[in-house]
Amino acid sequence: MNANRARTRHLNSGVREARQPRDAATAERVIAAITALLDAAGVEPELRAEVLGGAFVTEAVRPYWGSGRSAEEAHALLRHADSEMADAVEAAGPGTGAAGRKRDHSRD
């Protein structure tokens, strides 16, 4: 139980650091907070890049995904708003964008 409390305290300290005003949220502090969250969640080192890639894709598409839109529709809206970000999403998430559409059509 003490280990869980220590883990929670460590997690909370990372979250508090991430909540600092934007001008104080340097890349190093954000990275430290994310690392603390991954540590506290027990994410194995070999899975961290995959987890972070999924988080990146989720955050990039989130503003466009809603109101009953499909993943393909959300990605199309992202592409219209920011084609470079859409390219990065396709590279990071093989199940998104053109790669995902090709895979979906092959199931038909």
Image (cartoon, rainbow, N blue to C red):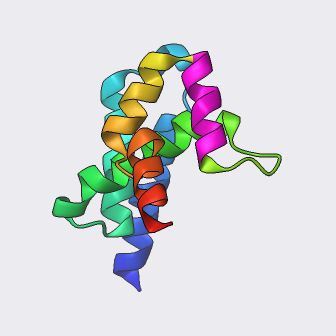
Asked whether 83 falls inside the magenta stretch, the response is no
Residue at x-position 30% and y-position 66%: 43
- Residue 25 in sight from this viewpoint: no
- Residue in the foreground of this view, choosing between 37 and 16: 37
Task: Identify the residue at the far right of this view.
Answer: 67
- Residue in the foreground of this view, choosing between 74 and 98: 98
Residue 10, given in percent of the width and then of the height, sits at 39, 57
- The N terminus lies in quadrant: bottom left
- Residue 22 in sight from this viewpoint: yes
Q: Is residue 107 left or right of residue 70?
A: left
Residue 36, given in percent of the width and then of the height, sits at 34, 52
Q: Is residue 5 above or below residue 65?
A: below
The span picked out in magenta is: 72-81
- Residue in the foreground of this view, choosing between 75 and 34: 75
The image quarter containing residue 106 is bottom left
Q: Is residue 24 above or below residue 56?
A: above
The image quarter containing residue 31 is top left
| Dominant secondary structure of the residues highlighted in magenta in the image | helix
The image quarter containing residue 6 is bottom left
Q: Is residue 55 above or below residue 79?
A: below
Residue 21, given in percent of the width and then of the height, sits at 58, 22
Task: Identify the residue at the far top of this view.
Answer: 23
Residue at x-position 74% and y-position 47%: 69
Residue 83, given in percent of the width and then of the height, sits at 48, 18
Q: Is residue 94 above or below residue 7?
A: above
Q: How many marks?
A: 0
Q: Is residue 47 left or right of residue 104?
A: left
Task: Identify the residue at the far bottom of this view.
Answer: 1
Residue at x-position 64% and y-position 39%: 74
Task: Identify the residue at the far left of this view.
Answer: 46
